C-alpha cells in the first residue's frame, strides 16, 4: 500500500543536530514555513548527535592541537583555530538567543562550563605547545589561556593525571576556563520539542528510501513508514539531507551532478567510561593530547569530564576503528553500496592512498582491553582496569573527493555542504568539527539555497547572531559584549557544577 501526501515547503531528512538547527533557523526567519521531518529511528538525536556517541566538546579550538599546525619555518598557523573559534561563537550566540527568548529552557541541561586543556610530554612537544600558546594568547578570541610546565601547577590543574607520573620527560599544559561541555543529544531533543510546538510534522520510524524531481521542479521523497510498513510519497520545494552518515546514499539517489565523484570513509569510535565515582570526582576538564603518528586527527586521545544524564562522568577516547557501516545503526553493506560508477575511481584512489590509515584503524579495532588501558595510563598512570568500561561511539563518515591539492580520492576531515545549483536540495557530509559548528554550517545552507530570501532575513539573523557577517577577532568590543551576554544567558560563569 502506498500514500501520496500533500506538498510542503521544506523536508528535513534525519533528526540530528543539523536538521534541528536548520528547522529552528527557518522557523525563526519564516514562521509560516511548513516543515516535515523524517527520521528512521524512534526519536531525535539518536545517532552521532547523541551524548554517548560524540565527545561533547564545544569545539572552539581551545585545546585541539590538530587545529594549529606548525609551519615549515617553525611558526604556528592559527588560521584554522581562529575560523573554528569564530564559528563556535556563532553557535553560542544562537543558543543564547533561543534561551533568552524561551524557545528552549534550562541551558545547564545542554551546556556546562569546563576548562579545556592541551597536554604534551617531551622536549619537542613542549616547545610546540609554548609557541602555540604564545600565538593564540595574543589573539582576543583566546583570552584567558594559561600555560604551565611547572609540575606543581599541573598537579593543581590535573591531579588525577599528575599522580603517579614517574617519567622524567618535561611536561606542559595550557588551560582555558571558558571551554564548554555540550550535550548535543539533549540540545537536539530540546530543539525538536520546540519545532513540534511550531506545527512541524515530525515523523519518527520513517526512512527515506528514494527521492526524485517531479516535472514541476519539486522533490518527491519516497518514505517507508515502519509503524505500518507502508510507503508514502511527500513533495517539497526544498529538501535538506541531514542524515549524518546516511546522507551520502540519499545524495547519490538525488542524482544531482554536485553529488557525483564523492565517496565516504567510515571511522568508528569507542570511548572508555569510568565507573568509579572517586576517580570521576578527581578530574574536572577536557584534556586533549597529541595524535599518535599515523593516527587520523579525529582519534586524538582526550580525557573528558562530561555531564550526561544528570551526573558528572569521565570518558577517555575515542579509539578510532574501522567498520563498513555509515551509521551506528547502519548496515555492513553501507560502504560497498556507496561505490557507484561515478565515484569508483575516486574510491579506488582513496583506498590506495590510505592503506596505512586503514591498517591503523583495523589494528585499533583489535586492541584488547589491557592495550587500551595502557593508552589510558599515558593520561592516568594509576588507572585500574576494573574502573573502566566501554561504550561504542557514533560513526564518522569522512568525505572522499578529487581535489586540486590532493588529487584523486583525497580524504577530507572537514564538514561539507553539497547543494544543487538551483538551491532546491542540500546535503551535509563529513563530521568535523561537527555539531559545534552546526549554526554556521546551516547559515551556509540558507545562503546557498535561499539566495532570494537571505537579504530579507539578514536583520533577523543579526538580531539572533550579532556577529553575523563580522569577524569577532577584528571587533574585540563586540566579542567582549557577546562573551558577557552568552555567559549570562547560558549560565556559564556563575554555574557551579551541580553534579558530583
Ligand atoms: C566519536 C565522535 C566524537 C565526536 N565528537 C564531537 C565533539 O566533541 N564535538 C562536536 O561538535 N562534534 C563531535 N562529533 C561530530 C558530531 O557528533 C556530528 O557532526 C553531528 O552529531 C552530526 O549531526 P547530524 O545531524 O548531521 O547527524 P546525526 O546526529 O547522525 O543525525 C542523522 C540522523 O539521520 C537519520 N537518518 C539517516 N538516514 C536516514 C534515512 N534514510 N531516513 C531517515 N532518517 C535517516 C539517522 O537515524 C540520524 O538520526 C563527534 C562524532 C563522533 C562520531
Image (tube, grey):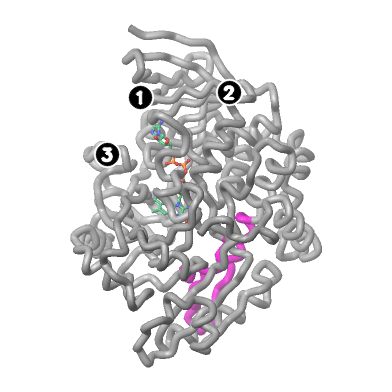
First of labels 2, 3 by sequence position: 2
First of labels 1, 3 by sequence position: 1
Image position, residue 127 (x, y; %): 49, 87
Q: Which residue is mark 3?
A: 334
Residue occupying image coordinates x 39% and y 66% = 300
Query: Circle 3 sits in a helix, a strand or a loop, which is it?
Result: helix
Q: Which residue is mark 1?
A: 209
Q: Quadrant of the N terminus?
A: top left
Queried on whether the Cβ of the residue with tag 2 lies below 8 angstroms from ligand 1, the answer reads: no
Q: Are marks 2 and 3 in contact (CB under 8 Å)?
A: no
Image position, residue 175 (x, y; %): 57, 74
Residue 200 marker: 2
Cα separation between marks 2 and 3: 30 Å
First of labels 1, 2 by sequence position: 2
**Is 205 rendered above or below residue 15?**
above
Q: Start and end of the magenta stretch? A: 60-88
Query: Circle 1 sits in a helix, a strand or a loop, which is it?
Result: strand
Snapshot quadrant of residue 487: bottom right
**Is 127 rendered above or below residue 421?**
below
Image position, residue 440 (x, y; %): 61, 48
Queried on whether the Cβ of the residue with tag 1 lies below 8 angstroms from ligand 1, the answer reads: yes
Q: Are marks 1 and 2 in contact (CB under 8 Å)?
A: no
Foreground disc of the pair 1, 2 = 2
- 359 to the left or right of 76: left
Q: Residue furthest bottom?
A: 168
Amino acid at each position: 500500500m502506498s500514500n501520496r501526501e500533500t506538498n510542503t515547503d521544506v523536508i528535513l531528512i534525519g533528526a540530528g543536530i543539523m536538521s534541528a538547527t536548520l528547522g529552528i533557523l527557518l522557523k525563526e526567519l519564516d514562521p509560516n514555513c511548513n516543515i516535515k521531518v523524517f527520521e528512521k529511528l524512534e526519536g531525535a538525536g539518536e545517532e552521532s548527535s547523541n551524548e554517548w556517541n560524540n565527545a561533547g566538546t564545544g569545539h572552539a579550538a581551545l585545546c585541539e592541537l590538530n587545529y594549529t599546525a606548525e609551519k615549515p619555518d617553525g611558526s604556528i598557523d592559527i588560521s584554522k583555530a581562529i575560523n573554528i573559534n569564530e564559528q563556535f561563537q556563532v553557535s553560542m550566540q544562537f543558543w543564547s538567543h533561543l534561551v533568552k527568548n524561551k524557545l528552549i529552557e534550562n541551558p545547564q541541561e545542554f551546556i556546562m562550563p569546563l576548562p579545556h586543556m592541551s597536554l604534551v610530554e617531551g622536549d619537542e612537544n613542549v616547545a610546540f605547545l609554548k609557541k602555540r600558546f604564545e600565538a593564540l594568547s595574543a589573539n582576543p578570541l583566546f583570552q584567558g589561556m594559561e600555560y604551565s610546565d611547572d609540575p606543581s601547577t599541573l598537579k593543581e590543574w590535573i591531579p588525577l593525571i599528575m599522580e603517579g607520573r614517574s617519567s622524567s620527560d618535561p611536561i606542559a599544559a595550557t588551560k582555558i576556563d571558558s571551554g564548554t561541555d555540550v550535550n548535543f543529544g539533549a540540545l537536539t531533543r530540546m530543539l525538536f520539542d520546540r519545532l513540534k510546538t511550531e506545527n512541524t510534522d515530525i515523523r519518527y520510524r520513517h526512512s527515506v528510501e528514494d527521492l526524485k524531481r517531479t516535472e514541476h521542479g519539486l522533490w518527491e521523497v519516497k518514505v517507508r513508514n515502519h509503524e505500518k510498513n507502508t510507503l508514502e510519497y511527500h513533495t517539497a520545494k526544498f529538501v535538506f539531507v541531514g542524515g549524518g552518515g546516511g546522507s551520502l546514499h540519499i545524495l547519490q539517489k538525488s542524482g544531482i551532478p554536485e553529488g557525483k565523484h564523492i565517496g565516504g570513509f567510515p571511522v568508528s569510535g569507542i570511548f572508555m567510561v569510568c565507573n568509579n565515582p572517586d576517580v570521576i570526582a578527581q578530574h574536572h576538564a577536557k584534556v586533549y593530547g597529541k595524535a599518535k603518528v599515523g593516527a587520523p586527527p579525529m582519534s586524538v586521545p582526550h580525557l573528558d569530564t562530561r555531564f550526561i544524564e544528570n551526573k558528572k562522568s569521565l570518558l577517555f577516547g575515542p579509539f578510532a576503528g574501522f567498520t563498513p557501516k555509515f551509521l551506528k545503526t547502519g548496515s555492513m553493506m553501507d560502504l560497498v553500496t556507496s561505490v557507484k560508477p561515478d565515484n569508483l575511481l575516486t574510491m579506488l584512489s582513496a583506498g590506495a592512498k590510505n592503506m596505512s590509515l586503514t591498517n591503523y584503524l583495523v589494528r585499533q579495532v583489535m586492541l584488547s582491553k589491557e592495550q587500551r588501558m595502557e593508552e589510558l595510563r599515558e593520561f592516568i598512570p594509576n588507572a585500574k582496569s576494573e574502573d573502566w568500561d566501554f561504550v561504542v561511539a557514533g560513526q564518522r563518515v569522512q568525505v572522499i573527493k578529487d581535489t586540486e591539492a590532493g588529487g584523486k580520492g583525497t580524504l577530507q576531515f572537514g564538514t561539507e555542504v553539497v547543494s544543487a545549483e538551483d538551491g532546491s536540495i542540500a546535503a551535509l557530509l563529513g563530521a568535523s568539527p561537527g555539531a559545534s559548528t552546526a549554526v554556521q554550517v546551516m547559515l551556509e545552507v540558507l545562503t546557498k539555497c535561499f539566495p532570494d530570501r537571505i537579504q530579507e532575513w539578514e536583520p533577523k539573523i543579526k538580531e539572533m547572531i550579532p556577529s553575523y557577517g563580522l569577524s569577532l577577532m577584528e571587533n574585540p568590543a563586540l566579542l567582549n559584549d557577546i562573551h558577557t551576554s552568552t555567559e549570562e544567558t547560558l549560565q556559564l560563569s556563575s554555574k557551579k557544577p551541580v553534579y558530583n
